[in-house]
Amino acid sequence: MPDVLPYPPDLAAIGTSGAPFRVALPVAELPPGAMRRVTFGELDIALVHAERGIVATDDRCPHMSAPLSIGSLDGCVVSCPLHNGRFDLASGDPVQMPTTGGLWPDGRYEPVWSPPGKEPKDDPPGPKAEARRLTRVRRLRYYPVRVVDGTIEVAVPVSG
């Protein structure tokens, strides 16, 4: 039976306290190193079998909402497929700012960056540059997970 990765309690998704658990998928469909999207109504959740256990988070990058489930996984760090932001599934913290730059969760500004060996990206003034300066990359939010009789279940808020 795989472990469930604990997460910081202050990062629980809104409405998950006391929310009913719903069947997500069989454990066999989420082998170690795999990521899958599961959908409940309009809520898309990324189920990830990281090296330290199974975790459920919003299936959207906390930068610009790209689906994390189609990104890549390295240990407990998930990478966004859109702007290469990297997020630690164990802590919820960004570990690499997206290439577009922006604000870290604590408000520090990170400029647009270029991969090593490439020319620095230009960041001309204007609305796009201003938007980047005001875009705060958030920490991940989590959904409680449990494994019952070989099935992964996720606590999903009841929509009203």
Image: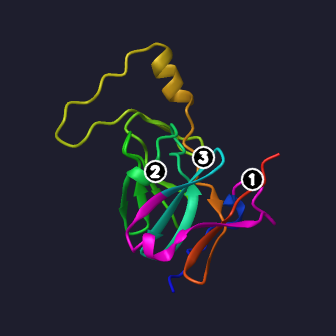
The magenta segment: 13-36
| Mark 3: secondary structure | loop
Q: Which residue is mark 3?
A: 106
Q: Which residue is mark 1?
A: 14
- The numbered mark, 3 or 1, whose residue comes first in the sequence reads 1
- For the question of whether residue 91 can be seen, the reply is no
* In magenta stretch: residue 16: yes
Q: Nearer the viewer, residue 137 or 3?
A: 3
Q: Tell which circle, 3 or 2, labels the residue nearer the N-terminal end.
A: 2
Q: Assess disc 3: are there few (<14), some (14-19) or many (≥20) residues with their C-alpha within 10 Å of its C-alpha.
A: few
Q: Quadrant of the C terminus?
A: top right
Q: x, y percentage for residue 39?
A: 58, 52
Instruction: Tell me residue 153's x, y (percent).
Output: 63, 70
Q: Amino acid at mark 2?
A: Leu
Q: Residue 113: in sight, yes or no?
A: yes
Quick one: which residue is furthest to the top in this view? Answer: 126
Q: Quadrant of residue 4?
A: bottom right
Give the Cα distance between marks 3 and 1.
Answer: 20 Å
**SS at circle 2:** helix
Judge left or right: residue 155 versus residue 67. right
